[in-house]
Amino acid sequence: MTLPFKISRGSILVLTLVISAAIMTVTTSFFGYFGSAIHAERVALAGTQARMLAEAGIDKAIYELNQNSNYSGESDTPLGNGIFSVSVASIDSNTKNITVTSAVPDAVHPTATKTVRVKASINTTQVSFRYGVQVGTGGVTMGNGAQIVGNIFSEGSITGGGTVTGDATVSVSTNPVADQQSTVQNSSFNVGDTSSHADVAQSFKPSVTTTLTKVSLDLAKVGNPSDLTIKIVSDNSGKPSSTVLASGTIASSLVTSAYGFTDVALDTSPTLTADQSYWIIAIASVSASNYFKWGLDTSSGYSRGSAKYSSNWNAQNPSWSSISGDLGFQAFVSGTLTSISGITVQGNAWAYSLSNCTVGGTATYQTISSCSVTGTQYPGSNPATPGSFPISDAQIAEWEATAAAGGTLSGPYSVSGTQVLGPKKIEGNLTVTNGAALILSGPVWVNGNITLSNNASLSISPLTGSSGAILIADATGNQATAGKVQLSNNVTTTGNGSAGSYPMVISTNTSDTAITISNNAAGIILYAPYGGMDVSNGATANQLTAKKLELENNSTITYLSGLQNASFSNGPGGSWAVVRGTYAITQ
């Protein structure tokens, strides 16, 4: 057979050269692409490293600020395989801008650079005073000419001859002693740190058939979690059912990093049956860095309940796992019947019983006698559920810790002339009198009594910015007889000129005279969660919260709307922290 063409040696050589050239071209292109990919990967890795360096610089800046609030930055600080520089600029005494620029491997020949900017501020605690006056189970007595300009909410009866210009609400009364409780805390169980811990529950059995008015949980927190939702549900064969009897919320702001019992204001007061099981469910948003810790007694000292957790309490057939121990809680039931009697309410009135009163708005009640009502009447109605106080024990303890961290002064301590204090702890009584002026630059904790009198003044330092400051009388271990506050004879209190700057005085004394204010003392927030308050002789205040309150003749409480969201700084002794939502990569 004869081939149609003849391949010569020259042709084979040419073909070989062509194929070799093609292979070389493909190989060169491949290695060029591979090299570009490696370079791009190196640049991407360097960019990630530079961002991490910049964030490390932010952490370093926060650390330095907490050691020295005058820290202004640093340059070319080596860390790992790069460097970073920090610039700190003050906006005001409580707020700073932090800018960090990083480079990998150096600033002269960088493979990558990043600039991160955040805002930092001294930690503040926001307190919402929703009423001009809020009172616990001790109730309120109003003398002739006494006036509350704003709303009042009380868990005890309101009686006397005064006037409320807003609404007056008296809730169902709460027995001050918990019907059921577990208060030992030797461990904890996380709520919301993982999806399996999204819902955590503790059961209890009431000792009597009556209404549940309030529950309180022993909580701490990590980071800044969202508010905690609480459900009271019935039992379903030894686990929580999906039948909700009452709901409530615990504001995250009321919980600190230290354990403390925090009240839950329920939306209704369900009737519970003696010796039947009911469950308190805490429902959290899941976050590995922002979650709650529920105090746990690993010895299982509470015999009338158990603890469980679930990923979804409201699923069609939820799975509940047992917790070894009892979670810290208190369950309170109703006490004596409450009323509004003898006063004038220009707004709406709501109580179990209304008698000998004048109501300019609507009237909501079970029974009524000798009351003039201008608005609509709602007879046969149940009273309101109790509300939680705006400041938790844990918040007070945190302010005290900040004060103590600022150093201790020996008492009794007297202020003369004008003096700036805070954060500071005073071991003994504090006296400010005869025209002396005390300026708070942070929380001051007095382990004794506080007396302000005879034209003394209490004000807030400009260093706190738009936040208020706190003066606390807390005689540790001796709250029954000490830790009292007395303000008299033309004492004046003021902020620092910034909107939202308010002075607040707290007493943890448990007597009926924990705080007394008289003789034209004016313009202050007073807080006595465990004791009584007496306001007399033309004294005025911006807001009062107490377990029990007596407003003598012609005393006045004038609520300021700004107190709905008042912030109180931990002061210079507090910690600097990054303001959430201000993180930005600018380069």
Image (cartoon, helix red, strand yellow):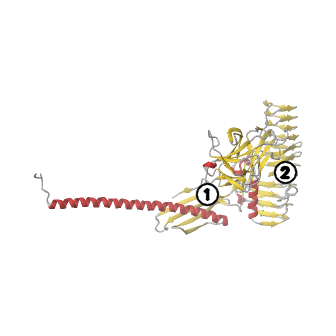
Going 12% across and 53% down the picture, which residue do you hit? 5
Q: Residue furthest left?
A: 2
- Residue 146 position within the rendered picture, expressed as x and y whole percent measured from the top left: 86, 43
Q: Which quarter of the picture shows residue 429?
A: bottom right
> Which residue is the site of mark 2?
531
The picture places residue 322, in percent across and down from the top left corner, at: 67, 48
Mark 1, residue position: 119
Q: Nearer the viewer, mark 2 or mark 1?
A: 2
How dense is the environment of label 1, judged by Cα within 10 Å: few (below 14), some, or many (20 and up)? many
Q: Amino acid at mark 2?
A: Gly
Q: Nearer the viewer, residue 561 or 243?
A: 243
Is residue 441 visible in the rendered structure shown here? no
Residue 514's disc is none
Q: Secondary structure at mark 2?
A: strand
- Is 533 situated above or below 371? below
What's the amino acid at mark 1?
Answer: Lys
Q: In the picture, residue 577 is in which quadrant?
A: bottom right
